[in-house]
Image: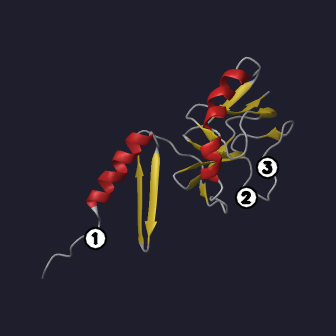
Amino acid sequence: MAAKKSSIDTKLIRELANLLNETDLHEIELEEGEMRLKLSRAGSVVSAPMVTHASVAPAPAAAAVAPAAAVVAPAAEAPAASGTPISSPMVGTAYLSPSPDADSFVKVGDTVKTGQTIMIVEAMKTMNQIPSTQDGVVASIDVEDGQPVEFGETLITLK
């Protein structure tokens, strides 16, 4: 009886592992047919479920226009921010609503609870729900819809 040959592509796994390190992502998930592969950095915690965002096509155009604004915005907003910041856990593109025609997850003045989704950050065509880290009232939304964000960049400020 011959041993069954594994259909796992170890070269692909190595490439994805290198991509995790190069991009500073915490997790990559790939699904093709019946195969599902999930790579995660040791010690990383991903607590928010993944969702599919219906409109991904406009993101590249927004990313091409906005990097200069992303560099200027944190410096301009840092002194004015008073309250508790909620930071991006990853590099990606921030979306304030679940789809282009839907209402924003939160608005200035809204009360949020710990774990409530405040926005989505797309990283490598994966939509990651960003939860509030504590209860509070939204004092400011520090990013624009479709804006590229960096790891640790303030997304919203709670008071």
Residue at 27%, 58% (x, y): give it.
Answer: 11
Marker disc for residue 7: 1
Q: The residue tagged with tag 3: helix, strand or loop? A: loop
Q: At label 3, which amino acid type do we have?
A: Ser
Question: Which of label 1 and label 2 is nearer to you?
Answer: 2
Instruction: Say which residue appears at 67% left-offset and 33% top-offset.
Output: 69
Q: Nearer the viewer, residue 61 or 96?
A: 61
First reached walking from the N terminus: tag 3 or tag 1: 1
Name the residue nearer the viewer: 58 or 83: 58
Task: Looking at the image, tell me whether mark 1 or mark 2 is earlier in sequence order.
Answer: 1
Question: Which residue bears the numbered disc 3?
Answer: 104
Query: From this viewpoint, is residue 41 visible?
Result: no
Residue 39 drawn above or below residue 79 = below
In percent of width and height, residue 27 lies at 46, 48
Label number found at residue 99: 2
Q: Amino acid at mark 1?
A: Ser
Task: Pinpoint residue 124: horizontal percent, then vertical percent.
Answer: 51, 52
Vertical order, 58 against 159 (above or below): below
Q: Residue at x 65, y 39 (%)?
A: 66
38 w.r.t. 2: above or below: above
Q: Position of residue 4 (x, y in %)?
A: 20, 76
Instruction: State the SS at label 1.
Output: loop
In this rendering, which labeled residue sits more in front, label 3 or label 1?
Answer: 3
Question: Which image quarter holds the N terminus?
Answer: bottom left
At a point 29% along the width and 63% down the height, the residue shown is: 9
**Is residue 65 visible from the viewing direction of this image?**
yes
Q: CA distance from mark 3 to mark 1?
A: 43 Å
Left or right of 142 on screen, residue 47: left
